[in-house]
Amino acid sequence: MDKFLFGQFQGLLKREVLEHRNLFIWAPVILGLLIFMIDFLVISSLDEDAKISFIENLARFFAGGSPLEMAPAFVFPTLPFLGILYICAILYLTNTLYQDRRELSVLFWQSMPVSNFQTVLSKLVAIMLIAPIFYVAVIFALYVIGILWLIISGLSYDIDVAGLGYMFLTATLSLPIVYLFTVTSALWLLPFIGWLLLFSAFANRTPLLWAIGALALILFLEGFIFRTQFISNWIETRSDIDNFLIVDYGGVFDRLFSYDMLIGLVVGSIFICGSVYMRRFVD
Amino acid sequence: MRELIKGKILKNRYTLLLTVLSAYIAVVVIEGAITGRAPDWLRFDNSLFTLDLRDLDELSEIDFDF
């Protein structure tokens, strides 16, 4: 990719982040603040002995352990962030191309030396690769603040806090797993991403309703006319969280290099290709 | 081929949508038929629980008295 194209793409990504900073930045920050406040209130409500025993137990649990082996333990506390990321992703994908047409900014972007393919690709990269970075950064900040607070509290009670250092290492090593999980799950769910983008580019109003309605209609017609359930079965296996949940580094390769991932990428590409061509119809 | 794409598929947004959805259905159905994926809506199987709705025959025998 030459320098001009790279600069163009960087500009498109910057535009996506700036236009959707509520979903990309403020949503995880507010969730992080909420979680921190709840934790703070719960721990503050403990009496002194309970606090000492809590910090001692934490330090003892992580002391001397292998941070790499214990990292999966820190994946599960990040699930609220991942839930919010998925909700924000649905909102983003259903509105992004629709909003461009509603505000007529699509005409401006089509007058620029930027192709429809580049625009759609920038939206995909923004939600699949860039948005998780902000979420992981907020989780990291939450870990740093939380563990620093535990260390300062531990030192003030004269507790051996060496184990909390291991805890910090473990938490930090879990972050790449969380990021890889979000990226791998986004690839696994590419058909859903493409589907939402397609209807975002198609619908004149209420794109989410169109996306859900069209899916329901296809499922109904398949069952009613052909008496088969291939599509419903395919959707069921694709949306089963067991098929894309990753809690360790080994799971990433198993998920990435599989036949099911490949067929998902093929189907997702059909929808994405459709949404690129759909952008030429501006009412 | 180019004429078909420009004249028919890219004629308007509805023909494009129908083409994309047809391609999607064709890929999923052909892939499902080749791999022999067994359609089974009534069975929910995951790491947390397994529920087969066909085994719930006794539900019909429950007499609700309101």
Image (tube, grey):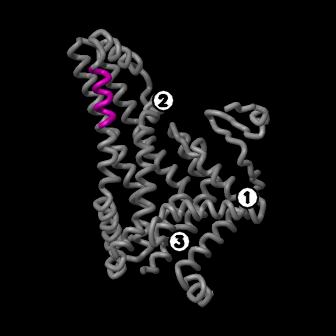
Estimate the spatial distance between the alpha carbons at disc 1 and disc 3, rounded to whole Å: 22 Å
Tag 3–tag 2 contact (CB < 8 Å): no
Q: Nearer the viewer, mark 2 or mark 1?
A: 1
Q: Nearer the viewer, residue A246 or A66?
A: A246
Secondary structure category for the residue under label 1: helix
Q: Nearer the viewer, residue A125 or B56?
A: B56
Q: Secondary structure at mark 3?
A: helix
Few, some or many residues within 10 Å of mark 3 (<14, 14–19, 20+): some
* Residue A43 shown in magenta: yes
Kind of residue indicated by mark 2: Glu
Q: Which range is magenta?
A: A34-44
Give the residue type that dot 3 points to.
Cys
Q: Position of residue B32 (x, y in %)?
A: 73, 58
Q: Residue at x 53, y 71 (%)?
A: A273
Callout 2: SS: helix
Q: Is residue B59 above or below residue A93?
A: above
Q: Which mark is residue B32?
A: 1
Looking at the rendering, in which quadrant would you find the N terminus of chain A?
bottom left
Who's the residue at 68% across and 35% down the image?
B50
Q: Which label number is shown at residue A69?
A: 2
Task: Name the mark on residue A273.
Answer: 3
Say whether marks 2 and 1 touch (CB < 8 Å): no
Left/right placement of residue A158 relative to residue A196 reads left
Residue A254 seen in the current view: no
